[in-house]
Image: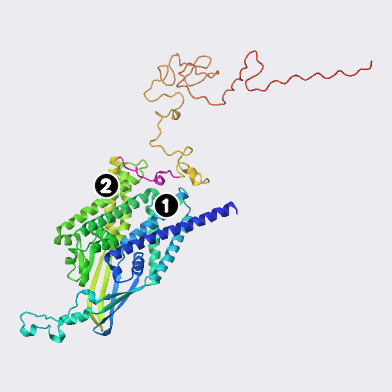
Amino acid sequence: MTLTSGSRAARGADLVLTAIAAVSWAFLAMAGVAALGLHLLGADAAGSLGPLTAAVVVLAVGGSITPSGSVEAFGLTGAGAHTTIDIAPLGVSLVGALSLGMVFARSLRPLGPTVRGSELLARAAAVALLFLLVLGGLAWAASSTVTFDGGGLGLGGAGGTTRIPGLGDIGDIGNIGGGLPGRLGDLAQAKASVGFSVRPGASLLGGLAWVLGVLLITLLSARRAPLPRRWQAAHRAVRPAASALRSVLVLAVVAGLAAAGVAAAGDDHPRRVLGAAVLGAPNGVWLGVPLGLFVPLRGTASGSLLQVLPHPLDELLRAGTDQSVTVGRIADLEPLVWLLPVGCVLLMLTAGVLTGARTPRDGAGPGAYAWRCGLALGVATAVALPLLVLATRVKADAGLSVLGVDALGAGLELSGSVPLALALGAVWGLGAGAFGGLLAYATGAAGRRASAHARARRPDEGRPGEGRSYPDLAYVPGPYAPSPGYRPSRPDTNPYLRPPGEARPGEVPPGGGPAGGTPGGGRGARGPSGAGAPGVSGPSGDSGGQDPYTAPTQTGRPPVPPPPRRRPGSPYRYGSSPVPPPDEPPPAPWRRP
């Protein structure tokens, strides 16, 4: 096996292992959160927890589920239940996105300061492919039927009377046909079975969009992960604002979970409150963020679904018609709602300060630095706020049809305006980013939390006309490629930038005269031999009486060092080999006697 083939095999194994780790951790985290929420809500008492958990995970990643049902009452069949639900449990989605993004971003760090675009694309494609395979398995498993027994509804009990006051004997309707309570008792014995199945095509398409969106958000907000060479500007302009906005949105969800824990402590059914918070805390929090930033919502509600809405939103939507939901209208019913805009403004200011602390200064002044931070956060908020509006829209419609007659109906629809969210997000982000940048600059925190990729000098900076022929590691600041200085070099502080013989500003040159020499001759005057001028060496190499500390640096070949001296009286040197004895003279030639 050659070195090249071994390197390719190692990279392929690392790619596959990274995809397996990212996808497995994401689905395990989502399954755990979904099972916990369903168990706290008591859903496992009506059906199997496994298929229910799979269905919730599929909904969380953009999948689609088709419910169906039938009701048997009074000995008749043919009743049907229809339900339409367009809502995603964002608590499950958030945990899966954070797990998938964290593992994927950490797998990119050992690749160096930059990563090739082809390798990044291959890693993302491997994660997406494995994610769709696992999602397809869940879509096959997320099909089941949940049966509800009407005897557990508390409507049973025969006999007794029901009397309407003011109608005399006519008002005694309890004895008609066995009594109304008896009929209600028969209805209580009804059995309702609700089945659900996953639509594979729509679920796989929604899952592909979800995983690609999570990977893109990860690359734009993971400050320590490398990027391709052409995307290096994102380290300095995009990632500080995107990571700051991501941090404050997750922090808002944590605050919502803490508020749900406090509310559960004083509620009669704390398990239900905690279960709803585990599954849907981001739904409520991220719906309140656009509303607190004065993005208007439109909503309608009817039937029993009004009970799931918080007060005073249920009072506002009780009319059943299309209503405009704004902070002002809700505050007319509950004045404490004005605390919502205050909290959202503080949230944006926190994002602005984090953006200022994570954006490198690069020698910019306070105005330019604040404008750069505001522009980056404005673009990020203009993209994020419409995404929150689309992710938190709610649409639910439930009905029970018996022999073609609708016996029960409930509906809920709540959505925001995407164009207004985009415009208001840009305005709020620009203001909060500029204020945060000025505050960070004034306190000295500007750029202090910038990542190493954002602080690193661009490879082509200061090297015009030079290409990149060495590995990327050669361009990282180090002993042979130092980082740029904090201030420009000046001649009064750098002696190598001053011409020979020129004194510092405000310093008297040697000899008491101007830099060119002392008029009238003197110590610095040029003698007949041509030596003695300040800054010019004579033939012997001396400075002609000039101060040796201000003498110019001599250029040329260095002098030849003298040979080492030998000790007198000793023919040998330390460390030398002994002199061999002289050879014997050759014998004399033979002569005839």
Q: Would you name the residue on which mark 2 appears?
A: 435
Which amino acid does the dot numbered 2 rest on? Answer: Phe
Q: Is residue 455 magenta?
A: yes
Q: Give the range drawn in magenta.
A: 444-458
Residue behind mark 1: 106
**At which x and y percent is residue 197?**
36, 73
Residue 83: image quadrant is: bottom left
**What type is the residue that disc 1 sits on?**
Arg
**Residue found 43% across the figure and 39% down from its top:** 483
Residue 413, given in percent of the width and then of the height, sits at: 25, 69
| Front in this rendered view, residue 107 or 270 | 270
Mark 2 lies on a secondary structure that is: helix
Q: Does the magenta stretch include residue 317?
A: no
Quarter containing the C terminus: top right
- The CA distance from mark 1 to mark 2 is 32 Å
Q: Left of 396 or right of it: where is 580? A: right
Q: Residue furthest bottom?
A: 177
Q: Is the magenta stretch mostly helix, strand or loop?
A: loop
Residue at 24% of width from left, 70% of height from top? 412
Query: Residue 569: in sight, yes or no?
Result: yes
